[in-house]
Image (cartoon, grey):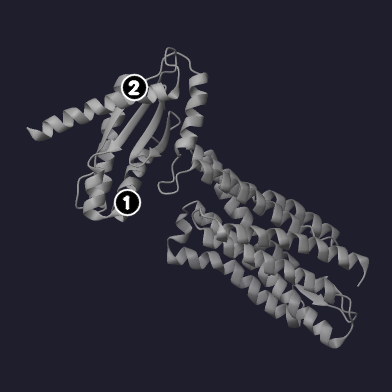
Amino acid sequence: MTLEKILYCEINIFCIMILLTLVYTVRSGFDRWVNQKLFETFLVSDIIFFLLDILWKMLDGSSNPVIREANVIVNAMYYIMSGVTSYLWFIYSEKMQDSQILNEKSTRILSAVPLGILIICTIMSIWNSGLFYIDDAGHYHRGVFYVVQLAVSYGYVIFTAAKAFLSAMNTTSYIRRTKGMTLAFFVIPCTFFGTLQALSGGIPLLCVGITLSVLIVYINFQGRMISIDPLTQINNRNQMVSVLTKKMSDYKVTRPLYLMIMDVDNFKHINDGYGHVEGDAALVRVADSLKMVCSNQNFVISRYGGDEFIVICENLGREEIEDVCEKINLQLSQLNEAAGAKYSLQVSIGFAKYTNEIQSIEELIELADEKLYQVKKIRKAAASN
């Protein structure tokens, strides 16, 4: 084996080791993000893709008829896997974007058509050399229709990246924007290194680009897991404290800053009477109502712990805050009714305005909590009459 082949294989093996480490990490990790099984499948497909690249390099250049035929089969499998890995990333990215494409059977089938075309063209190339061929000396060459493989493989990645980028630019939600930009960025290392490999031919740069893209996605989504509540998919307590600390340090009188704290009325009754699974469903509905009502840049929503939620409100007046409180319970009632729940679901909300006299986050939360206690006391008195 030549030095060039050894180096080629070593680069692929290094990338495979990184991906195997990621597979092990995500499978053994306690915390799991949305669609993680699909992400694992994508990682495994990349590993197979890189292994085929190694096998091709080892077989290439042999005029032995048996090895030459094996080289044809390996290259066909490589071309098919290039489409499969891209398609799996497309599915994963679209799932993470809650895409409508995958909701309808007709659009799901349509999305798989380019992959089907690539598979058919690849199989036909074994005989007609359309996408690739192996010469008599055993060397691989690109066919006249090689562009089909590029169009399908890169088309899936570029299409879903463009959608993710546009979605990120058109949302006021920090969480959705961060997720969209992460998914959109995936295409950059893949395209850059893949283009270099297509131009050079002899250096395995595509595997480097894919591995780098995967690492960026993994690191970013792991970072999101640190700041996102796994049940409700909104900010957790740590992220709320981080955001509120910054807003308090940047506070200006011209931009009023409020903190709303809320908990679920009779939540223990829901848990005891209908089970913890239903209790979790109720908490998700509370979070969903907050997402719907507090959807613009003036709000930061978070789960504080248990059945408690905190909303940071900026640049709103007291009357507007009171209006938001009413809208939250109205939206929550609608979601609860749509879910067919056999119990009423409401939250009691207290809020407090930040001023320069307030020394800490704990003090601001305590002020809002006092208002919450007053609201619950009034409701309890009204219910007993």
Crowd band around label 2 with a 10 angstrom C-alpha radius: few (<14), some (14–19), many (20+):
many
Q: Position of residue 154 (x, y in %)?
A: 67, 58
Left or right placement of residue 75 versus residue 169 in this view: right
Q: Residue at x 32, y 20 (%)?
A: 318
User: Residue 281 has which mark?
Assistant: 1
Which mark sits nearer the N-terminus, 2 or 1?
Answer: 1
Three-letter code, disc 2: Leu
Left or right placement of residue 162 versus residue 16 in this view: left
Answer with the quarter of the image where residue 133 lies: bottom right
The vertical placement of 151 against 373, above or below, is below
Three-letter code, disc 1: Ala
* Alpha-carbon span between mark 2 and mark 1: 29 Å
Q: Residue at x 45, y 56 (%)?
A: 100
Q: Quadrant of the C terminus?
A: top left
Crowd band around label 1 with a 10 angstrom C-alpha radius: few (<14), some (14–19), many (20+):
some
The vertical placement of 233 against 379, above or below, is below
User: Residue 264 has which mark?
Assistant: none
Out of 37 and 119, give the one closest to the viewer. Answer: 37
Out of 31 and 337, give the one closest to the viewer. Answer: 31
Mark 2: which secondary structure? Answer: helix
User: Residue 367 has which mark?
Assistant: 2
Mark 1: which secondary structure? Answer: helix
Q: Is residue 260 visible?
A: yes
> Of discs 2 and 1, which sits in the foreground?
2
Tally of numbered discs:
2
Q: Position of residue 216 (x, y in %)?
A: 65, 48
Q: Position of residue 382 (x, y in %)?
A: 12, 31
Q: Position of residue 115 (x, y in %)?
A: 61, 69
